[in-house]
Image (cartoon, rainbow, N blue to C red):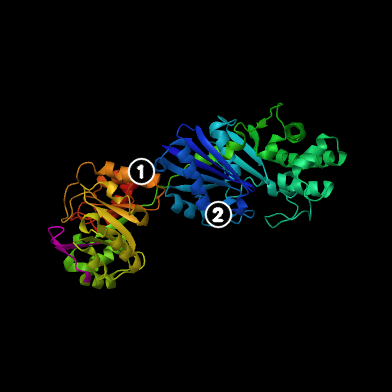
Amino acid sequence: MYKIGIDIGGTKINIGLFDTEQKILLKSRKSYIKDITNLPLFIKKEIEDICMETNVSFSDILSCGAGIPGTVSDDGKKILKAPNIEALTENFADTLEDILSIPVRLVQDSRAAAWGEYLCGEGKGKNCLVCVTLGTGIGTGIVLNGAIFNGALGCAGELGHLPAEENGRVCGCGKKGCLEKYCAGGGLDITAEELLGKYKKASDLFDAAAKGNEKAILAINSAIRMLGNGLVSIINLLSPDCLLFSGGLSMQEELYLNPLIDYIKSHCYTAAGRLPYVSRAGLGENSPLYGAAFIPIKEKKKHFLSASIMCADILNMGKALNEIEISGIDYLHCDIMDNHFVPNLMLPPELLSKLRKGTSLPFDYHIMAENPESIIEKLNIKEGDFISVHYESTIHLQRAVSMIKEKGAKAAVALNPATPLSVLDEILPQLDMVLIMSVNPGFAGQKIVPGIFDKIKNLKKILSDKSLNNILIETDGNCSFENVPKMYNAGADMFVVGTSSVFRPDMSIKEGVEKLNNCLRE
């Protein structure tokens, strides 16, 4: 299994694929991400290319962590502030998670760098680690007692926004005179233009200093003193045993990093001559990638429960619908059977239309009938509904799928246990879901057929290999407390729950749903 780490910077994006032994297998680097109109789709394409190059299946990726230049909520799901990159919207994590269909967590890039160094780099075994990222801006990550330290307000480590010059340069945070506007790459770009002329960059400033330009040397030394004083304050306050530097500016060792380290060591408070270990980060520019990839992610991919209405108490349907809705069920699974395709009769469209008045839940129609096209026409469809037709029930499958789409529903094809997955080759790109029958259709209460977990896993791999990760996999038949976690781990997303789980005489529907969700969380 594998993990993805992403480092989104002001001028570039790095994406790395890691194995669970914390070894990076392949990394891609792209510049000028501000020009990317749809960043989540761009990231997905890059990951797919990396998977293809490394011969890794997308379905074997466990999670994705992304380091961003901004403030993130404690759960890593919301961007609270990212002033420099418009593509990083508040719900960026949810959007990326939906596109990738794997768990995603965000972390401030400097904290990702600190965590990466703590796990895999120069900070291994340290008790209090401070890692300063010197890039376009300045970020600071703190790892204290084996965990990233965010602070009570979530803003710990904002070294770059310490006030350095009263009424100075305007910063992206909305304040003036912040440290990073003078000491980071972006700030030194401004200094270079002021001293050397229009369009000059920090690299030109360092080149000029290397050639003996007095103004450039003085400007760089001034930046070193500013940044050094800020870092001395951090050392005196926290007393860390390790201070590391990452980011592109840390590569300027002779003119910037080494003088900065000397300044810090000569100015910080010491007891009995003890100084923190101060060095450039061991992982270099990959520090945030490592940290993002291995940031703890508790969330699993989202699952959906579709309650089989044929298993409910039909004599008290109003009460049953209410209990289903408040239990946390996502869909109502409505079986339509004709006693020809399957040996049973169940739930005519007229009855299902009346059931609409008793619930706001979307319907998950499952047509087990010959000539499903004639039934599709009669269904009362609302936004969010699924309609599944069996591959085995019609010789005009594409026409049936088109009719479903025209009705405004999401299209799914169901397969009987003995039907091979290969029959979906032509129709798969047009689908929103594939329904795998884990019993032979027609009756509730059957035992699961052998080999179904492998069939789900094989379908998941097919979807991954074809870059169709947005297509859901639903399973129907003996979705019990024991089987659903196995189906989920094999790759299924949605489960038709009935008499073997939520409709049981020994517990309420709500209790059954809670037990099923607990089984999945475990």
Which residue is label 2 attached to?
79
Dividing the picture into quadrants, the one containing residue 240 is: top right
Is 345 a magenta residue?
yes
Crowding near the residue tagged with mark 1, few <14, some 14–19, many ≥20 C-alpha atoms within 10 Å: many
Under circle 1, the secondary element is helix
Q: Quadrant of the C terminus?
A: top left
Give, as a three-letter code, the residue at label 2: Ile
Tell me where residue 233 appears, x and y as whole percent. Answer: 71, 41
Tell me where residue 521 appears, x and y as whole percent. Answer: 35, 46
* Front one among 51 and 213: 51
Mark-to-mark CA distance, 2 and 1: 32 Å
Can residue 406 be seen in the rendering of this structure?
Answer: yes
Q: Quadrant of the N terminus?
A: top left
Q: Is residue 91 above or below residue 148?
A: below
Tell me the residue at 70%/29% (across/down).
271
* Front one among 470 and 103: 470
* Front one among 201 and 506: 201
* Span of residues in magenta: 333-349
Can residue 143 be seen in the rendering of this structure?
Answer: no
Tell me the residue at 52%/36% (across/down).
26
- Left or right: 133 in relation to 312: right
Tell me where residue 217 appears, x and y as whole percent. Answer: 83, 38
Comes first in the chain, label 2 or label 1: 2
Which residue is label 1 attached to?
461
